[in-house]
Image: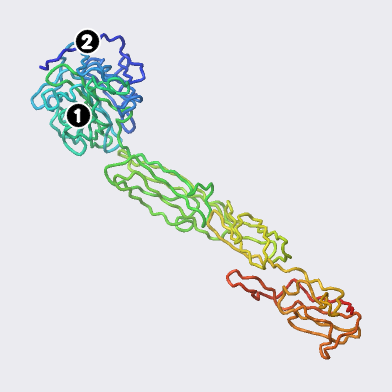
Amino acid sequence: MKNIVLAFLTILSLTSTTAQLSVDASNQTVQHYVQNVLVGSGVTVSNVTFTGDSLQLAEFNGVNTFLGINEGVMLSSGKAIGAIGPNTDSVLTLPTSGFGTPGDNDLDSLLSGLMSYDAAVLEFDFIPDGDTVSFNYVFGSEEYPEFVGTPFNDVFGFFLSGPGIYGPHSNNAINIALIPGTSLPVTIANVNAGTNSAYFIDNGTGATSPHNVNPQYIQYDGYTTVLNAVGVVTCGLTYHIKIAIGDCSDFIMDAGVFLEKGSFSSNAVDIDVEAGIANGDSLLHEGCNTAFFAIEHAGLNKDLELKIIMEGTATNGGDYSFVPDSLVIPAGTLQDTLFINPIFDGINEPIETVTILILYPGCNSVDTVSASLTINNYNPLSITVDEDSLNICPPETAALVVTHSGGLTPISYSWSSGGTDSIETVAPAYSQDFIVTVSDLCGSIVSDTVKVWAQCPVTPPNVFTPNGDGINDYFSVPHLDEYLHPRLEIYNRWGKLVYTKDDYLNDWDGTHIKTGKDLAEGVYYYIITPNSVKYQYSVNTPQYMEHEEMTIASTLRGSVHIKR
């Protein structure tokens, strides 16, 4: 027997309402703790019983603690409220109806010849909807760390029995409270600072900071990390679970097991399918965006084969990419996705529907789930520029305008000059091509080109004075040098050609083309043909390049007065 002195405290309430661990063992029924707190999805529970003192079973809230479980049900070898922190007592014992209340035979079978006492045993039958049953828990004890490796090995177990289970415990039960990846039961001897320490949390001695001052710590000197108990079952059959805890070899220093709220569940084959459109689009269009059916389930220990039936007005493999008639989701994988890629057929037709029916194995039956999509026509993206070419006289500006039709919004614009709107204002110093590229949400891309000619109007003078004084001595036509190969013809008043020149360079000084003599003062008539080609400036090749037939500057006719 341990040589210790027990301090018995007066318990004023069975309910803790402080900011630390909250434990309520007041007025709830055993059925409430199981049906309303412990049990989650995929199980049907019946025949709930509890053996022990009612104060050993309680509902707890651990949100404001380091326990690792927010809410649930706890069983203790003493009064459940003894778990409330901080850890101010290294030998906490809160007996219920006295020392040495009965133990449990299944707990004794885990103790290698030792005896259990003060047992708290919660039992019930359940029918699972899946092929496993599981729940999460934390085990803690005041026996840590002083009595690790001694006979004072407080014990608990989760004893599962039923069809197909053949174990060493009563009713052929097996214990599923095991150290992960092993067949070892979770006990003080098997989980501590020196053995399987990855699953152990040291919570102080009852006299060390911060554990004895911070209310977020619980009372027990040590406890496990959150562990998961798992048992293999057959859906639709009735099983029995026995959750038990007790003192070992003596009647003192409490232990407790915390069971997570809603975690006692079975992985029923519960398929959920959701229809969606990639990138968050609101509508699905032919040949454009992609839709999907997202399939999720709770997870099995084996591959899950689903039967796929495609319905709706759209044709599988004709109006959208082919979807096979079955899908296998591998064991351990919780989701898969079937993609629907509508095919563009260029036919204007009513909105089409795609409905997926998924048949999957339920518990001794076949269940069905479905989801639907609609496929809309897609009008291909096209663009129009207001003007294929514009002419400016620098430093004038030109407004380049593009409009679109069809496509799927939002529409994006990109000009070679850097703009991103449907209207781009430019002021090129040289004639240039401006390329606009337009794209839509579907990924369609179309382009067009606007030519902006930086060429000012040709404005011939109406008089010049070729007298050799260096002022206005030549028939100089402003901006004519912006055109390649201009031609000048000069006629006298009788229609006789007196001067002509191709590739005119603004260098006629009023002389006769044949005699070279000065022409008499008077009025002469010109024909100017800017002629030939326009040109544009190439950034990559720093020279003027011939581009295409001129369409802006036409032949000019007029008169000029020679004054000497």
The residue positioned farthest toward the bottom in the image shown = 515
Q: Residues within 10 Å of mark 2 (few under 14, many from 20)?
A: few
Name the residue rendered at 33%, 19% in the picture: 22
| Above or below, comparing residue 537 to residue 77 in the picture | below
**Residue bearing the label numbered 2:** 8
Location of mark 1 (residue): 159
Q: Residue at the location (67% across, 73% down)?
A: 535
40 sits to left or right of 449: left
Can see residue 104? yes
Q: Which three-letter amino acid code belongs to the residue tagged 1?
A: Phe
Can you tell which quarter of the image residue 481 is in? bottom right
Residue 352 is situated, as x and y percent measured from the top left of the image, at: 53, 51
Q: Quadrant of residue 34?
A: top left
Q: Is 272 positioned to the left or the right of 284 in the image? A: left
The residue at the point 20 percent across, 15 percent down is 93
122 or 425: which is nearer to us?
425
Q: Quadrant of the C terminus?
A: bottom right
Q: How many marks?
A: 2
164 or 413: nearer the viewer: 413
Give percent across and percent down for residue 62. Answer: 33, 24
The answer for how far apart the CA atoms under marks 2 and 1 are is 33 Å
Q: Amino acid at mark 2?
A: Phe
Taking depth in this image into account, of 386 and 52 the one nearest to the observer is 386
